[in-house]
Image (spheres, helix red, strand yellow):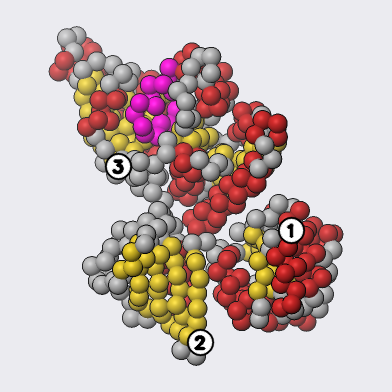
Amino acid sequence: MRAIVVGARGATRDLLRRLSERWTVTLIDTDPQLLERARAVRDVEVIVGDGSSRVTMERARLSEADAVVAAAPDDDVNLEVCRLALQAGMVRVTALAADPEHLDRYRELGVSAFAPDSLAARRLESSLEPRRVSSTPFAGGRAEALEVRIAENSPVRGMSLRELSSGTWLVAAVLRGDTLIVPHGDTVLETNDLVTVVGAASDFSRIVRTFTAGEARFPLDFGKGVLVAVDTPDDLGETLGEALEITRNSPAHLLVVAHRDPAKVRDESEALEIAAMLGTVSDFSEGVDLRFHPVDGDPVKKLGGVIAVESIGVVVLATPPGSRLGRAKAARLLRRSAKWRRPVLYSRGTNPYRSIVAPARETPSGLAAARAALDIAGHSKGTVIGVAVVPPVFLVGSDHRDASVRALAGLREEASVLDVPVRRLLKHGNPVRVIETATGSADLLVLGSGQRSPSVVAPGIVGHLLQRVEQSVLVVPAAP
């Protein structure tokens, strides 16, 4: 993630010491000596210039920044920096007031500002870093109390404190909902717990990494396995390959292969063909935990029954490219798969996934889809293109742009925890056309499932895009 900091004095240098390694910082000041002192603290890009100048901020690539900090010794400069950042659509804008009597001027802009220097550095750092609530020094600065919110993909979620024991820090309290828990060794951390950690200030960075890092979970929130149907030799190509890629490059435990039961096939040659296909699947699946699930009849039509008895996290379906799919077949596919309440990968063999498009939306299924895209990109070393679409104002109202900006900022924040690069696109127009255009050079499109059942007449955004793009499409419902 990128931050632009205007002002290179004491509080800024303290901030540079505290910010985690995921931040790339561009530092602006009119004093070259102050910039050199700051570079001695941390490797940062420096610009000699006036941060209140639009030209200087453009040199610092304001449009690509995730956060702006105004920390110059002049409040007029800081206020102009904040205005420029807000005009550019920045969500994270914060400032250090040179004069505490000017704090109201920042509040009028809707910008959080702090004073004096030491308090400012601590609060700035807490507001920039994801998943941290606050931190407070004590014991003459030798110790620090840190409050952390446990996220769904936190590596410490589900762990007991005994497993997390350390000689330099301890968990002092856990707030779970409205209940305060005085923890012990058997206390297990859960999602949304507010955890107070007390430890040595010298160990601050390691404490932060331990509790705020992220780990890929898709598709484990839905089930442990990847499910694919094999019925003809054609299914041994792209579809099986894509199912194996998802299995190998995710936390999924196994690949479940649904197939016709040879024992229930009357034609002996057909039974031998099935056995030969299953042997080929085994040959292709080296290193993958494989489970064959025989069914009576067409395995694609029996997938619902397999899901009922197996722990399935994602279903992989062979799907024609959008140009050959047709509206009626797309609607049938979506209606059938919606009953499974599982993520479905409509496979077109466009793996590996180096570029993944994910619309940024604040709906439950939109958030689940964004997390899936980030998890897949983390395993495949790919890039996520986050797309936020603002429809015409007369259709959705003026608040929709703010929601889109928030959704893009949230996507970037989650990506930073997983060290996944994200490109952000905020576009006005028709959502289907915007997303279709963004997907043109990508390998995978990840969408949240729609709330309404699709039909031939009203296929919804997912149905329209399934017909229009040639890439594989992963449709993700809200997490159970």
| Location of residue 308 with respect to 134 vertically, above or below | above
Foreground residue, 97 or 92? 97
Q: What residue do we see at 78% from left, 82% from top?
A: 33
Give whichever of 391, 54 is nearer the camera.
391
> Can residue 41 be seen by looking at this rendering?
no
202 to 19, vertically: above or below = below
For the C terminus, the quadrant is top left
In primary-sequence order, the first of circles 1 and 3 is 1
Q: Is residue 85 something that shows in the picture?
A: yes
Tag shown at residue 141? 2
Q: Which residue is mark 3?
A: 224
Amino acid at the residue labelled 1: Ala
Q: Nearer the viewer, mark 1 or mark 3?
A: 1
Q: Amino acid under label 2?
A: Gly
Indicate the secondary structure of the residue bearing disc 3: loop
Q: Could you tell which of marks 2 and 3 lies nearer the N-terminus?
A: 2
Residue at the image point whose x is 83% and y is 59% from the top: 54
Q: Residues within 10 Å of mark 2 (few under 14, many from 20)?
A: few
Labels 1 and 2: the sequence-earlier one: 1
| Left or right: 372 as drawn, with respect to 84 | left
Residue 127 location, x and y as percent?
Answer: 57, 66
Left or right: where 251 falls relative to 472: left
Magenta segment, which residues? 332-347
The x, y position of residue 386, in whole percent, is 59, 43
Which residue is tagged 1? Answer: 85
3D distance between C-alphas at marks 2 and 3: 46 Å
As measured in the structure, the alpha-carbon distance from the residue carrying label 1 to the one carrying label 3 is 44 Å
Q: Amino acid at mark 3?
A: Lys
420 versus 341 height, above or below: below
